[in-house]
Image (tube, rainbow, N blue to C red):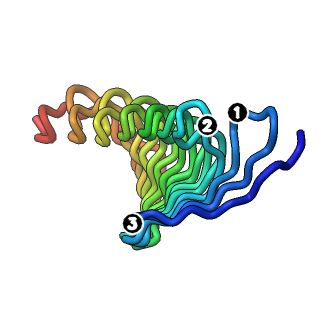
């Protein structure tokens, strides 16, 4: 690979700095728009889209650092929000998709499967006070079989539907005593 050029272009809406290497389809670019948005990373010389690894910073302060394909987040990456929330994991077509971990500034953590930007599939969510849910999620809510454990050792094993306890389950106190329970949409029967 031979370095052949370095140039800076200034348009009405953006400043683009490029470094071009001969015989390569992916080049390095630093692009800054007048509204403060920036992209620094690889891009495709064929499609002129973000492609490879790079960092994109929005005017709002949101930042994505990771893999790109055809102008969208695709592969492994880290997304950081100005409030301190951080997602680390897989992306597909610009959305959280696959395995990932979302750490919220308030101390809540979700680690597990994502689909179309939402927790969906098997995962674990824990809260700052020590409670934890392990099980299935759909549409960012507990959905399917799961176990909720309180910080004092109490535990509930059962089924959830759209974030609410549903159907039969078993409650365990800290000593391990069992109480069978039945729920309907979050209401104890």
Residue 12, disc: 3
Taking the image as shown, residue 41 lies to the left or right of residue 187, namely right
Quarter of the picture holding the C terminus = top left
In the rendered view, would you say 166 is above or below 4? above
Across and down, in percent, residue 107 comes to 46, 67
Taking the image as shown, residue 19 lies to the left or right of residue 3, namely left
Which of the two marks, 2 or 3, is nearer to us in this view? 3
Is residue 61 visible in this depiction of the protein? no
Q: Which residue is mark 2?
A: 44
Q: CA distance from mark 1 to mark 3?
A: 27 Å
Q: Residues within 10 Å of mark 2 (few under 14, many from 20)?
A: some
Q: Label 3, secondary structure: give it.
A: loop
Residue 25, disc: 1
Name which of mark 2 and mark 1 comes first in the sequence: 1
The residue shown at (65%, 40%) is: 52
Name which of mark 1 and mark 3 comes first in the sequence: 3
Cβ atoms at labels 2 and 3 below 8 Å apart: no
């Amino acid at each position: 690979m031979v370095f052949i050029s370095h140039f800076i272009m200034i348009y009405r809406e953006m400043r683009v700095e490029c470094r071009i290497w001969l015989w390569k389809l992916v080049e390095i670019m630093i692009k800054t728009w007048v509204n403060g948005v920036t992209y620094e990373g690889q891009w495709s010389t064929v499609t002129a889209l973000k492609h490879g690894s790079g960092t994109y910073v929005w005017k709002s302060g949101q930042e994505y650092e990771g893999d790109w394909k055809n102008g969208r987040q695709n592969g492994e990456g880290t997304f950081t929000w100005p409030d301190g929330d951080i997602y680390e994991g897989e992306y597909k077509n610009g959305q959280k998709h696959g395995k990932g971990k979302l750490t919220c500034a308030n101390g809540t953590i979700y680690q597990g499967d994502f689909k179309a930007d939402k927790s969906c599939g098997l995962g674990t969510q824990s809260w700052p006070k020590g409670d934890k849910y392990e099980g299935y999620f759909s549409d960012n809510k507990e959905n399917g079989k799961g176990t909720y454990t309180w910080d004092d050792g109490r535990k509930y094993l059962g089924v959830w539907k759209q974030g609410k306890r549903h159907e039969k389950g078993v409650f365990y106190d800290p000593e391990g005593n069992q109480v069978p329970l039945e729920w309907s949409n979050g209401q104890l029967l």
